[in-house]
Amino acid sequence: MKHKKHLLLLLLAVFLPSGCMGGGSGGSSSAGPTEIAYVLSEDTNHNNNGYVVEYGLSPSTGNFQVSASPPLSTGGSTPFQILLSPHNHWAFVLNNNNSSDTTPSAGSVASFSVSSNGLSQTSGSPQAIGENTVNMAIDPGGTYLVVANHGNGTSTGTGSVGVMSYNANGQLSSMNNAGSPCAYPFRVVFQPGAAGSTGDMVDVVCSSPELLGTTSPPTLVIYACSIVQLETINGCGSGSSITLPSGTTTNTAMLNFVFDPSTNYAVGPAVTNAEDGFLIVCTLASSLTCNNPNSFSDIISSSSYTWLPSGNISFFNSGGTPTVYIGNYYPNSNSTFYDGNLFAPCSISSSATTCSSTPFTSNSSQEGPIYLATQGSHLYIISTVTPIAGSFNGSSQTTNPSIPTSNEGFLFSCPLPISTTATCSTPVTTGYWPVGISSDPNANYLFVPTLSQAINVYAGASIGNLSPFQTLSDPYTPISVIIH
């Protein structure tokens, strides 16, 4: 399959949060920093060990400065996610592998307290969890943390869904691993209305992008499970599955699943083994009801393009109608570059979903929109023109990546709403291979981590007039950024 070795690195980008309010450590002034960026990083030279590196915005210099404290170990390797609790008291890091566990495939969750002095690891952290951890979710009520352990990534897989709780001190309970409604859980998402009770509903997306090229890839299934069902052996089974539209479950993998800010809809970009992308939209009432998908390939008039959604999506709401933006990241089989200089705006509703193709009309030479994020009245897009080389494994990552060193990434600003074409700004450059976008609480800055061991910071985020502000050097390889 042509996209196999490139696709799943992109999926990492779908988890990047945009930030939160508060203070933190770092900086050298007597007054504490006005905000701090926590950068989840990976030491690719030493077993892919995970760290959190802190950069504080100094009120005296007006710049971000690395904390005088050393980077905090996450207690594991190949870190995937960093999330803040609903009230920003705790930070949780998902490690694909746990350093202290004798089973190489076992993952862990590390917990940190958040204060004006930065992060500090809580007692008993990290907690070991299941095999090949790929995703976690925190309930809005601030009680539970649910983890998708993808298992060995085969159609007779060993995946599980684990439930943990955390107390007033941020300490995690031992993982309650009660099996799974499927053999290959890939995403876990709390449904709106979750309040920290055992009745809270979690959508478990069972999807295996890594198996699309096999003879019989597993069927795509979504289960709606309560916390109490997930904590009970075989408590969430076939009776809890959500009915998906006909023709969308076989030879298909869902790349992401997320509720829009209005919480009325859940959307999931997906791809088939024939490399056709489409969007599934589900309406939430008393339960989820999923509509017929809109095929990205149907909206492209030129036969030279095929849709391969990057997995990351971004929302914008205008006049009560949500719009989702999805990037196309399809490799040209005739070159090492990417033809995908398009993205699709899709207006979603309970009755119909309408998508249209939108090229970078003023910047058609820039390809590969890997990540999209909305901030106020602007859509921000990062792209790269050089694919990353590496092999593919069942943990939703590439292994042994070869980082491009000859071509930069690009960051665009596009005013919203967008109709048929996108007249985006002249791009500003980023480091080699950008992997995400985060904004600070006041929308003054955008942070773009890159695999070239740098975090590019840009000013002008609130007005869409971006200018390079600062480049932060990371001692490791930055994966994602959250700002507090």
Image: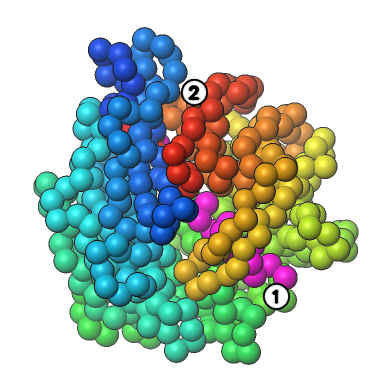
* Residue 469: percent from left, percent from top: 55, 21
Against 209, residue 341 (above or below) is above
Mark 2 residue type? Asn
Q: Which residue is mark 1?
A: 1
The answer to which image quadrant residue 381 occupies is: top right
Question: From the viewer's perspective, is 256 left or right of 163?
Answer: right
**What's the magenta region?**
1-20
Against 444, residue 232 (above or below) is below
Q: Residue at x 21, y 32 (%)?
A: 115
Looking at the rendered structure, the number of numbered marks drawn on it comes to: 2
Q: Residue at x 63, y 89 (%)?
A: 215
Give me the C-alpha separation between circle 2 and circle 1.
41 Å
- What colour scheme has been applied to the protein in the rendered image? rainbow
* Residue 318: percent from left, percent from top: 58, 38
Against 273, residue 264 (above or below) is above
Q: Which residue is mark 2?
A: 444
Magenta stretch: helix, strand or loop mostly: helix
Of 324 and 214, nearer the camera is 214
Mark 1 residue type? Met
* Residue 210: percent from left, percent from top: 56, 74
The answer to which image quadrant residue 25 occupies is: top left
The local secondary structure at tag 1 comes to: loop
Q: Residue at x 35, y 65 (%)?
A: 97
The local secondary structure at tag 2 comes to: loop
Residue 13 inside the magenta-drawn segment: yes
